[in-house]
Image (cartoon, rainbow, N blue to C red):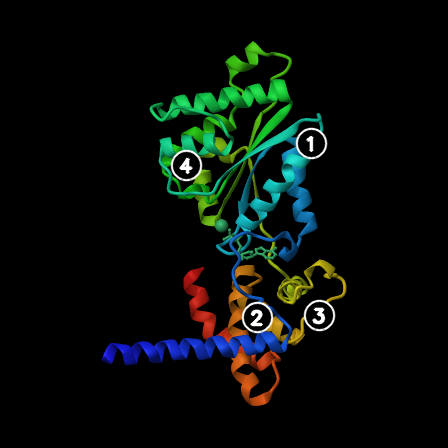
Amino acid sequence: MTIAVHESALIRHFNTRKETLRAWEEKIGARFSPFRGFKMPDSRLYVEHPDFLDSIVDLIITNERHIFLRGPVGSGKSTLMLLALRDLPTLADRRGNKFVTGYVGMTGLYEKQMAAAIADSLRIKYRRSWESSQIIEAVAKECVRRYIEEQSRTALFIEDVADNQEAAFHKLRYLADLPTEEMKDEYPRTLDEPIVTLVMSGTAEYWNAMLNFLPQIADRTEPLDIPKLEDGKAKEFIGRRIAYAKGEIDSFDPTDFDVYPFHEEAIEVINDAAGGNPRDIRMLARGCQQVAAENLRESGSPEINVEIARLVSEAYASILKEVR
Ligand SMILES: Nc1ncnc2c1ncn2[C@@H]1O[C@H](COP(=O)(O)OP(=O)(O)O)[C@@H](O)[C@H]1O
Ligand SMILES: [Mg+2]
């Protein structure tokens, strides 16, 4: 009996909160919360850094270095990878080679798991009973075949690369160094450049660790820092999400858009607290939505002003510090 009373109190509270938020969303003409998390990134929500994208594409196409996308948690490494992954198969390098892509999103992998994940991601067959070196040998052979017969280079994306077991790195290193000397001897005119480009991601701490433990790969890798969202882009981030929730994203104009019910200065306060980190901007904006929704009942206004933004930023300051 007691339990039932507690339960109903909790559920009642939960439902009231949901209704409060819903009323705010309805008031601004949104179909759902603009600040909910989406599992798959929708490129229409993406705030572009064109110069940064250019530098990544240039590096991949000129084929001189591997890439390490460097940034704190929530800065947008995974999102960027997934977008690059989608676009790369439509591009060609300066020699006219196309790209075959593979994506390893899991971490904490041992040697054999890493070998298997790479083979799976590149759709290369192997036997369960094989040793990791046999699997990687099959991957290497197939990458060579794709290069020679299909004029396709391989781009292999590895998320949070340093979160894997150390032995797993040797597999990566072997692929990073392809073609081997023997392969070059076998195909002297065709195999004269690297055929696998690694696109890795991780934090600055992990990059430093890689410099120490894996200098052989790090020396040939370009670290690229994910840009922070400056205020104009933070506004676009919020503007896009509001338009999305209103069903108006397809007519979004990045040079002329609305951030209502946010005051522009409120977004500056949020962005300052978030340090330009998109995940943190989203968390803070959602916090602001909650406060504004509570206000809406009394004031009738759904607006998010500087006071609300300050309140929420202060309340979240310690949480943000911890999750970073
Ligand atoms: N440039 C961007 N524009 C819009 N949203 C972004 C951008 N970068 C990241 N996000 C969002 O921020 C959140 C964190 O991004 P994520 O790629 O998972 O970061 P990381 O992999 O660095 O931890 C996701 O909700 C993502 O959709
Ligand atoms: Mg990530």
Q: Earlier in the sequence, mark 4 or mark 1?
A: 1
Residue 192 showing in the rendered view:
no
Asked whether mark 2 and ligand 1 are closer than 8 Å, the reply comes as: no
Other-residue count near label 2 (Cα within 10 Å), few / some / many at <14 / 14–19 / ≥20:
many
Kind of element beneath mark 4: helix
Q: CA distance from mark 3 to mark 1?
A: 38 Å
The residue lying toward the viewer, choosing from 151 and 192, is 151
Query: Which numbered circle lies on residue 270?
Result: 2
Badge 2 amino acid: Ile
Q: Position of residue 97 (x, y in %)?
A: 67, 26
Badge 4 amino acid: Phe
Other-residue count near label 4 (Cα within 10 Å), few / some / many at <14 / 14–19 / ≥20:
few
Left of 53 or right of it: where is 275?
left
Q: Position of residue 68 (x, y in %)?
A: 54, 41
Residue where numbered disc 3 is placed? 258
Kind of element beneath mark 2: helix
Badge 1 amino acid: Ala
Query: Which numbered circle lies on residue 213?
Result: 4
Query: Which numbered circle lies on residue 92?
Result: 1
Residue 18 showing in the rendered view:
yes
Q: Earlier in the sequence, mark 2 or mark 1?
A: 1
Q: Earlier in the sequence, mark 4 or mark 2?
A: 4
Q: Residue at x 68, y 35 (%)?
A: 91
Badge 3 amino acid: Asp
